[in-house]
Image (tube, grey):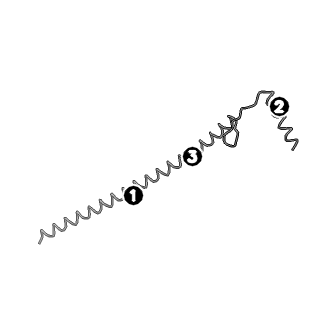
Amino acid sequence: MLKIIQDKIRDMKIKLENDETEQTYQIGSRTFTEKEWENLIHRVDKVLEQNKKQVEEKENEREKKKVNEINMKDKEQTIKHADDTELDSLITLLRHEE
């Protein structure tokens, strides 16, 4: 344990001598350097973008399905209407023949 602490002190001393230290910021219970914070934000943004794309894809799929259902209902109505019209024409013809 003492070795680990001594190594850490040595590393900190070298960084201080070479002016390689970075300021840290307390965020919640953790501390981050600016570089660590930027990396974290970048990863979070990436995940959010992926989630947004997935949501958009699912929404597009739902929209396509809805359009297909509407088109199918329209076709069914057209067919039903055509059948009714044909029946009306046949009934009219039959009545005239009597």
Q: Is residue 69 above or below residue 52?
A: below
Helix, strand or loop under label 2: helix
Asked if residue 93 lies left or right of residue 40, the reply is left
Please tell me in which quadrant of the rendered image residue 20 appears: top right
Q: Residues within 10 Å of mark 3 (few under 14, many from 20)?
A: few
Q: Nearer the viewer, mark 3 or mark 2?
A: 2
The residue identified by callout 2 is 13
Q: Earlier in the sequence, mark 3 or mark 2?
A: 2
Q: Secondary structure beneath disc 1?
A: helix
User: Residue 43 placed where, x, y %?
Assistant: 63, 42
Q: Is residue 27 left or right of residue 92?
A: right
Residue 46: quarter of image: top right
- Which of labels 2 and 1 is toward the front? 2
Name the amino acid, label 1: Glu
| Real-space CA distance between mark 2 and mark 1, rounded to the nearest whole angstrom | 70 Å
Q: Return the residue nearer the eye: 25 or 22.
A: 25
Quick check: 93 left or right of 47?
A: left
> What residue is shown at x 47% (from left), y 51% (from top)?
59
Spot occupied by residue 84 in the image (x, y as percentages of width and height): 24, 64
Furthest residue to the top?
18
Estimate the x, y position of residue 7 in percent, counting from the top left: 85, 38
| Image location (x, y in percent) of residue 47 | 59, 45
- Give the CA separation, mark 3 to mark 2: 42 Å
Quick one: 71 or 37, which is closer to the camera? Answer: 37
Q: Residues within 10 Å of mark 1 (few under 14, many from 20)?
A: few
* Residue to which mark 1 is pinned: 69
Q: Compare marks 2 and 1 and give the one earlier in the sequence.
A: 2
